[in-house]
Amino acid sequence: MGKRLFLNIVMMGTVVMLFASCSYKLTQSGASIPADLKTIDIQFFENNAPLVVSTLSQQFTEALKDRIRTQTGISIVRNEGANATMSGAITGYSIAPASIQATNPNVAPIAGASRLTITVQVKYVYEKDKKLSFDESFTKYKEFTGDLSTQEPALIRDINKQLTDDIFNRAFAYW
């Protein structure tokens, strides 16, 4: 009985030590962040899209910072000494018909719904583990009906949330 108890304690101690030495920490968001990733430099995402919304760059950059700030323990810094860097640009902002609505026989059809699409090019560099680095394009859209000007701020917020979720998951959840 004593020998069996001793072996069980040794086994449990070994298992605990193995898990304690893992180099990744899990967060409530489902992210798996390397333990030594403490700081990140998130650079300003310039709007290089053919159609430019003057506040889009600032809104997107802040949405990405907020996502990282609220879902991880990583500090956002503005310097070259950061453990990781995220940079890029907004490369696409477009509005296109999503569905066509028939009209009278001698009148051209009109858009029944439209689609606002935003594309962002993101470069994530993590020097300690190059396998986690990436340079990818992310695109999301939202369909709407009616006048864009009254809905545009809410549409941009929704699309920014979708984009930042995808970028966050790619950088920290390895999806």
Image: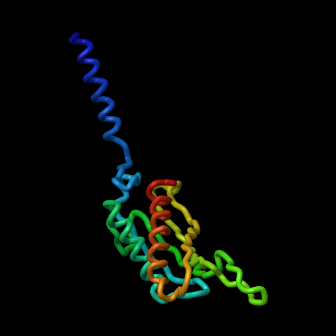
Tell me where residue 63 appears, x and y as whole percent. 40, 73
Q: In the rendered picture of this protein, how many numbered marks are placed on residues?
A: 0
Which residue is located at x 35 percent, y 50 percent?
25
Tell me where residue 87 appears, x and y as whole percent. 49, 73
Q: Residue furthest right?
A: 106
Which residue is located at x 73 percent, y 86 percent?
104
Which residue is located at x 61 percent, y 86 percent?
50
Along the viewing direction, whichever of 98 and 125 lies nearer the viewer: 98
Along the viewing direction, whichever of 132 and 58 lies nearer the viewer: 58
Vertical relation: 108 (above or below) 166: below
Along the viewing direction, whichever of 38 and 25 lies nearer the viewer: 25
Tell me where residue 78 appears, x and y as whole percent. 36, 75
Vertical relation: 172 (above or below) 139: above
48 relative to 74 in the view: left or right: right
How does the figure colour the protein chain or chains? rainbow
Which residue is located at x 56 percent, y 66 percent?
135
Along the viewing direction, whichever of 79 and 155 lies nearer the viewer: 155
